[in-house]
Amino acid sequence: MGLFDFFSRKKKDRNYEEDIDRVFDASFGGATGGKDDFHRPEMRQHFVFDKCEEMIECSHQMEEAKMEYDSVTSYLMDIDIIDNLPDAQRAEINELAERISVLEADRKEYQEYSNRLSDVRFAGIRMYEDEFPANIERLKENEKYKAVVKRDIDVLSGEKANINVTVEEAKRSNTNLKKWAFFIPIIFGLLLVVTFVLKMQLYWDITTFLCIDIFLACAAGAAVLIKNQKNNTTITQGKYNLNHVIVLLNRTKARFVSITNAVDYVYEKFNIHSSYELEYLWNEYSDLKKERARHSLATDDLDYYTNKLVHELAKYDVNDPVIWGGQVEALLNDKEMVEIRHGLNTRRQKLRARIENNSSRAEQIKSEIMNMVNEYPQYSEEILDIVKSIDSSRGI
């Protein structure tokens, strides 16, 4: 079943009129003439492509969050199983954990790099060891993309401000031209009066003066008219450019919010501030892991008791018993177990919120596209064909 299968049927029992203005405000920046632009094929295609791409991104975000949500939930279930073990069985687990803890302490004495990473952070990186290099590269790419999108927003915001200034200057110029258009006839009339006074009082030949007066009046009027037409052209072109910039700016801001959420989530997940810090942690982890392997003194005993712990936990249906080999302090220290549980619950709440937000946004996008289908039934087949082609090409 495709992501966009909901478009295969018409919804006739819902009134979308009240949402149309909001949809156009979101898609065309609330600019005048936005709905008229929807009659242009390229604008319809841009609208549908953008919405479908955003919906696909929401779907991918939800799938990723759901997978991690299931992993965190499984981890919490394991904690519940261990906490609810009968006293005798828990004592056996604690005894194995104590032996492992002692062996770990002995081995750390011979580790040159033991203080570079905390045990908690080391264990946290080990949980994601297989995917850590990919996470680093993906975070680097996302940070670069975020910087590019932010730069685009700054450029578009500056362009928007420049267009507004240009349009306002043209409007002020037209206001001044109206004043000149009012005064030019008055000045021309005064010149005529002066000319006829000269003729009557001094008996001058006023033909030349009349020609000069008429020429000046015509030149001034023509200048006002030409400047007014030029300003009107500037205003019209400015409004068109402004609409286009607003569409691009809104689209870019939506991408910025999406990529910022993805980057911030990784920052919070690993308690870092940049991909360089994440890469540094990975390098430190790799070095420390090598040193532990090289300088480990009780490897055989440690492996034996760790495997025994895993085997014992597996008997009680613990989903991921292997991970507890690196979390023995939590088995022995209730406070640390509570902290782990609290951290997992916090992560699960955030993952649930992320899933709900993406699901809500996906439903909103569906509604927006259907709004367009109902608002413009003459384009409904074209819109639905675009959606189906994207659904088919993406294989979802």
Image: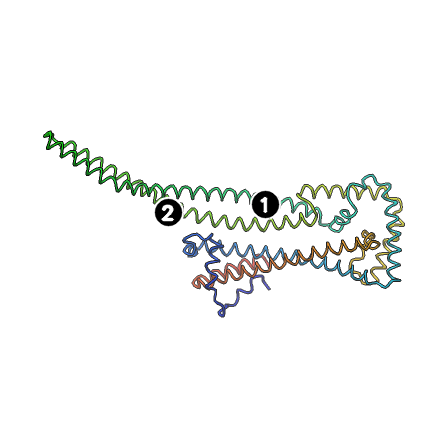
Q: Which residue is labeled 2 in the image? A: 236
Looking at the image, is mark 1 or mark 2 earlier in the sequence? 1
Residue 127 located left or right of residue 217: right
Q: Measure the C-alpha gap from mark 1 to mark 2.
A: 34 Å
| Closest to the observer, 145 or 25 | 25
Q: Which residue is labeled 1 in the image? A: 146
Q: Secondary structure at mark 1?
A: helix
- Up-down relation of residue 34 to residue 207 (above or below): below
Q: Quadrant of residue 353?
A: bottom right
- Up-down relation of residue 236 to residue 310 (above or below): above
Kind of residue indicated by mark 1: Lys
Which mark is on residue 225? none
Residue ID at (75%, 59%): 76
Residue 174 located left or right of residue 348: left
Mark 2 Cα shell of 10 Å, populated few (<14), some (14-19), many (≥20): few
Kind of residue indicated by mark 2: Thr
Q: Secondary structure at mark 2?
A: helix
